[in-house]
Amino acid sequence: MTRFEDIKAFAFDVDGVFTDGLVLAMPDGDLLRQFNSKDCYSVRTAVNNGYPCAIITGGVSQSLLHRSRSLGVEDRHLYMLSKDKAEDFLHYCRSVGLDPAQVAFVGDDIPDIPAIRLAGLGVCPADAVAEVREAADFVSGFNGGRGCIRDLVERVLKSQGQWKFDPKDPWKGGHPEAITKFAKLTGRNTQ
Ligand SMILES: [Mg+2]
């Protein structure tokens, strides 16, 4: 197991990690998810302080792409429709030039176990399934969509003196251009 102070990057599953695992199935087939703003803020803070972040999910949706961009996750680090999370996790590690031992992965269910085992720090929320809790190096005291990401990111960044932000410019430099354009066009909140 890698210590919090040696982690250089993060990768996250979505359902049951960013969210509580519930999805709202719409008549047109789309799935609506609720994200936790405090978790999302910590991811943005990690990105702003130089920690690459990836999203590796079996799901797919336009809103997921939008959410991912607004967190500062690069498009090349957004793996949707992932069939093999371990393979995608390794691809991500290579693309940021890090050894898997330097990267944390957070997941909550069976398909996440191989990536949790490969990661230097395999993490899961308190309400992950039993097999995942057994495989994880660190079980957060917080549930999926209820602070498990915030818990991990704060532990890692604080252990390295990198939990830094400017309260006057919390999103540091604003959102990527595509998101800003979208917000101006629609008047929609992008956070
Ligand atoms: Mg999941």
Image (tube, helix red, strand yellow):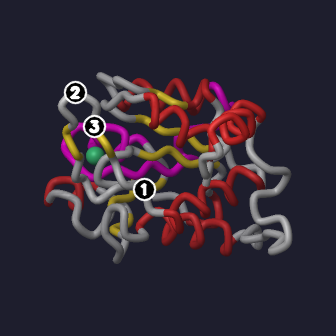
Mark before the other along the chain sequence, 1 or 2: 2
Look at the numbered disc 1 and say if its residue's Cβ is closer than 8 Å to ligand 1: no
Q: Quadrant of residue 36?
A: bottom left
Looking at the rendered structure, the kind of residue marked 1 is Phe
The residue segment tinted magenta is 95-118
- Residue ID for mark 3: 31
Residue 188 horizontal/vertical position (percent): 60, 47
How far apart are the two marked residues, 1 and 2, measured between alpha carbons?
A: 19 Å
Nearer the viewer's eye, disc 1 or disc 2?
A: 2
Q: Is residue 162 left or right of residue 150?
A: right
Secondary structure of the residue carrying numbered label 2: loop
Give the distance between the C-alpha atoms of the residues marked 3 and 1, in whole angstroms. Answer: 13 Å
The crowding category of the residue bearing disc 2, from other C-alpha atoms within 10 Å (few below 14, some 14 to 19, many at least 20), is: few
Task: Write the residue at 37% across / 35% down.
Answer: 57
Q: Nearer the viewer, residue 56 or 89?
A: 56
176 sits to left or right of 16: right
Q: Which mark is residue 29?
A: 2
Q: Amino acid at mark 2?
A: Gly
Q: Mark 1, residues whose alpha carbon is within 10 Å: few (<14), some, or many (≥20)?
A: some
Residue 35: mark in rendering: 1
Q: Quadrant of the C terminus?
A: bottom right
Which element type, helix, strand or loop, lies under badge 3?
strand
Q: Secondary structure at mark 1?
A: loop
Q: Residue at x 53, y 68 (%)?
A: 38
- The reply to whether the residue tagged 3 has its Cβ within 8 angstroms of ligand 1 is no
Q: CA distance from mark 2 to mark 3?
A: 6 Å
* Residue farthest to the left, as pictured: 130
Nearest the eye: 19 or 111: 19
Q: Are marks 2 and 3 in contact (CB under 8 Å)?
A: yes
- Asked whether 185 or 32 is in front, the reply is 185
